[in-house]
Image (tube, helix red, strand yellow):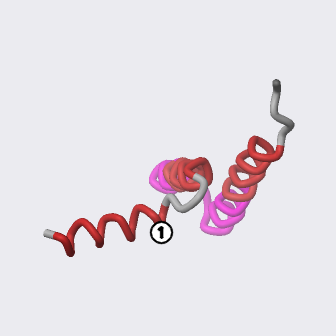
Amino acid sequence: MKFLKSFGAFWYDFIIGDDWKIAVAVVLSLAILLAAMLSGAFSDTVLTVFGGVLIIVAFSISLAIDVRPKRR
C-alpha cells in the first residue's frame, strides 16, 4: 500500500508541481485540441499550429496571473 501512495504522490507532484494553474491550462488546451481534431474540420498542419498557440497562450495567462501585483 505504501508503494501505491508513493507512486500517486510522485505523479501528483510531477504533473501538478509548484503551479496547478499551468497543469490545468495544459489539460484544457489539450482537450480543446482533441475536440478540434475529432471534428475533422482542420488539417494536421493547422492543428499543430493551433495546439502550439493554445499552449503558449495558456502558459502566458498563467504567468500573467502569477506576476501581477498583489492588492493590499
Residue ranking furthest to the bottom: 3
As rendered, which of 56 and 5 lies closer to the eye?
Answer: 5
In the image, residue 17 above or below residue 63: below
Residue reaching furthest front?
72
Read off the residue under disc 1: 14
| 2 or 47, nearer to the observer | 2
Look at the image and give the residue range highlighted in magenta.
Answer: 32-53
Residue 6, visible in the rendered structure:
yes
Vertical side of 37 occupied by 32: above or below: above
Residue 21 as seen in the image, left or right of residue 3: right
Residue 49 lies within the magenta run: yes
**Residue 41 seen by the camera:** no
- Number of residues whose C-alpha sits closer than 10 Å to that of mark 1, classed few (under 14), some (14–19) or many (20 or more): few
State left or right for residue 31 relative to residue 71.
left
**Residue at the image position 67 percent from the left and 58 percent from the top:** 55
Which picture quadrant has residue 26?
Answer: bottom right
* Residue positioned 61% across, 53% down in the render: 22
Magenta stretch contains residue 20? no
User: Residue 61: image x %, image y %?
Assistant: 75, 45
Q: Is 46 on the left or on the right of 15, as rendered?
A: right
Across and down, in percent, residue 64 comes to: 80, 45
Q: Give the SS element for disc 1.
A: helix
Q: Position of residue 17 (x, y in %)?
A: 54, 62
Judging depth in this view, the residue of 33 and 12 nearest the camera is 12
The percent coordinates of residue 44 (x first, y second) are 60, 67
Q: Which quadrant of the rendered structure holds the C terminus?
A: top right
Q: Main secondary structure of the magenta part?
A: helix
Residue pictured at 19% horizontal, 71% vertical: 2
63 lies left or right of 7: right
Indicate the quadrant containing the N terminus: top left, top right, bottom left or bottom right: bottom left
**Which amino acid does the dot numbered 1 rest on?**
Phe
Q: Residue furthest right?
A: 69
